[in-house]
Image (spheres, grey):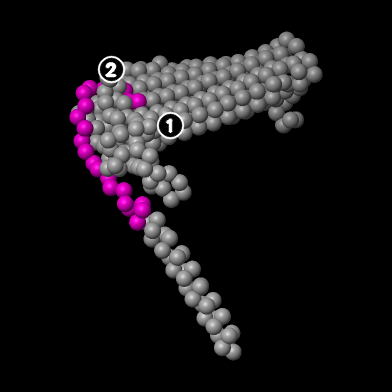
Amino acid sequence: MKRLTDKSLKAIIGMIAFAFVIVLVPQSLQAQTLSAKLTDKEIPVSEFNSLNVSDDFEVTLARGAYGVRLTVDQDLAPYVEVYVKAKTLYLSYDEKSVPKELKKLYKGRNGLTPVFRVVAYTPEIQSIALSDNASFIGVEEFTSPQFELTAIGKSQVKNLAVTATSAKIILKKNAQAVMSVKSDRGVEVNTDNNSNLKLTFTGKELAVNSEGSSVLVANGEPCERMNIFSSGSSQVSVTADAEKVDLTTEGSSKVVLTGKGDAMTVKGSRSSSVDAFSMPVKTVEANLSGATVTVSVEKEVDVTLLSGSSLYYSGTPDFKIGKIVKSTLAPYGTK
């Protein structure tokens, strides 16, 4: 009985010791997390109307007199670069200059998470360039004669509202953005790789070039023209009225349109698809080679179908048939 009691006692002691270690680990990690000290300082800068942000900076843009408020880990502060050149505010982190021992604190599973927070003040913004995990938050609407956003490398725009004569948006390499753009001339959108854009727009024209595996979801006011090119496996969804709609689709891309319009032109190839059933138009001109298109049309369809393509329609339009070879032209519902 004594031997059994000793074994039991050892087992109990072992369990208590193991539990004690488990309790200590989170406390140790918490202490490590809290060990980083932050410094907060105002940085005077000259006039700027553009931003160029890289690395892990979190930038908030607000209207006001030119200035920068920087919040950063105290030990990393000497390696943060903040300066203005040619009216562009540059924000970056010179990681190569950081001593190895300091770098170790921010690496590994239990490493510290570096803090790079900036509030930038300017009365006007004309361009924003983000890269390398940079993130951007807009808290006010900005007015600009011309505006351009370029975001690459997992960078994010969490909220941005701009009013401009013309606007251009470029997203690549997993960049993500949520934006509202009001433009007299219109908005040009370029998405590629695995980028994702949610856009609210106002303007005369929406021009889209969507490639790779990118995703675009756009909602807008009535416009004069909508010009969309999609390729790869991109997905484009647009809700807006447009007098003229021009579509070119390639690869396995997919376009979904909602609204109403006057005239629609579709050029589709390979296994791409267009679902424009919820955008009734007066006339459709379709030239397809392997693509699948669904339309709602009132007056006339001018169609050429090749290489196993399909055009499904609703309404009672007149048909002007150029050529149909191993393809399908049929009412919607017979699909």
Q: Residue at x 35, y 18 (%)?
A: 146
Which x, y percent locates residue 157?
A: 41, 33
Q: Nearer the viewer, residue 72 or 62?
A: 72
Image vertical order of residue 153 relative to residue 73, above or below: above
Which x, y percent locates residue 173?
A: 50, 29
Is residue 314 something that shows in the picture? yes
Which x, y percent locates residue 286?
A: 66, 16
Q: Residue at x 42, y 59 (%)?
A: 26
Is residue 293 something that shows in the picture? no
Q: Residue furthest bottom?
A: 1
Image vertical order of residue 4 relative to residue 144, above or below: below
In the picture, the disc for residue 86 is 2
Q: Residue furthest right?
A: 326
Q: Quadrant of residue 165?
A: top left
Find disc 1 in the rendering and name its residue. 132
Residue range in magenta is: 31-52
Image vertical order of residue 12 relative to residue 55, above or below: below
Q: Residues within 10 Å of mark 2 (few under 14, many from 20)?
A: few
Which x, y percent locates residue 332?
A: 70, 28
Q: Residue at x 73, y 10 (%)?
A: 322
Magenta residue check for 45: yes
Q: Amino acid at mark 1?
A: Asp
Q: Amino acid at mark 2?
A: Ala
Q: Nearer the viewer, residue 315 or 146?
A: 146
